[in-house]
Image: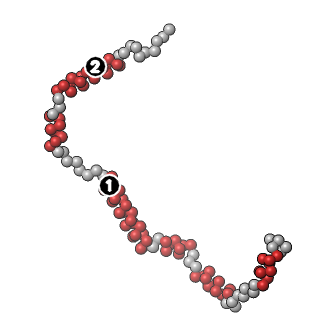
Amino acid sequence: MEPQDDKELWDVLGRLPEPTLSPFFARDVLREIRQKPDYFERLRNWFSVRKMVGASAVTAVVAALALVTHYPGPRTTSSSDSDVVAKVDPQDYDVVADLDELIAWDENNVWDDKPTL
């Protein structure tokens, strides 16, 4: 941006006092840099024992919930299952036999073959 683009803005900026730095600014910056942990220290802090115990506990709870909700518990056979088999109508056996004959007939049907000329 050039000064002739926006003269009012540059006038306002010209009236502001210049920032003054503390005489100890360089010392304070260097101290902050020295106190900043290096890469391995940050990595070690990230994998602290407290965080690892918490993460493993959360993982164990999630795995247990997944197993409990997706595992369909033990099946118990009820007495009503055997009663259903005993109550089958003999006429149903005839229908099944007829279906078997229909399937066999359908497999041997000559009309399904493509005609050759």
Can you tell which mark lies on residue 85?
Answer: none
Residue 113, can we see it? Answer: yes
Task: Give the residue type that dot 1 points to.
Answer: Thr
Classify residue 101 as left or right of residue 33.
left
Can you tell which mark lies on residue 69?
Answer: 1
Residue in the image at 31% along x and 56% along y? 68
Coordinates of residue 106 in the picture (x, y in percent): 34, 19
Q: CA distance from mark 2 to mark 1?
A: 45 Å
Residue 40 sits in which quadrant? bottom right
Residue in the image at 30% along x and 52% along y? 71
User: From this viewpoint, which residue is outermost toward the front?
Assistant: 8
Coordinates of residue 97 in the picture (x, y in percent): 24, 22
The local secondary structure at tag 1 comes to: helix
55, 66: nearer the viewer: 66
Residue in the image at 32% along x and 17% along y? 105
Residue 50 sits in which quadrant? bottom left
Task: Give the residue type that dot 2 points to.
Answer: Glu
The N terminus, quarter of image: bottom right
Residue 7 sits in which quadrant? bottom right
35, 95: nearer the viewer: 95
User: From this viewpoint, which residue is outermost toward the bottom?
Assistant: 23
The residue identified by callout 2 is 101
Coordinates of residue 110 in the picture (x, y in percent): 39, 13
Task: Examine the rendered structure and indicate whether residue 60 appears above or below residue 96.
Answer: below
The local secondary structure at tag 2 comes to: helix
Task: Examine the rendered structure and indicate whether residue 116 appears above or below residue 98.
Answer: above
User: From this viewpoint, which residue is outermost toward the top?
Assistant: 117
Could you classify mark 2 by the number of other residues whose Cα lies within 10 Å: few (under 14), some (14-19), or many (20 or more)? Answer: few
Coordinates of residue 90 in the picture (x, y in percent): 17, 26
**Which one is earlier in the sequence, the residue at label 2 or at label 1?**
1
Classify residue 80 as left or right of residue 32.
left
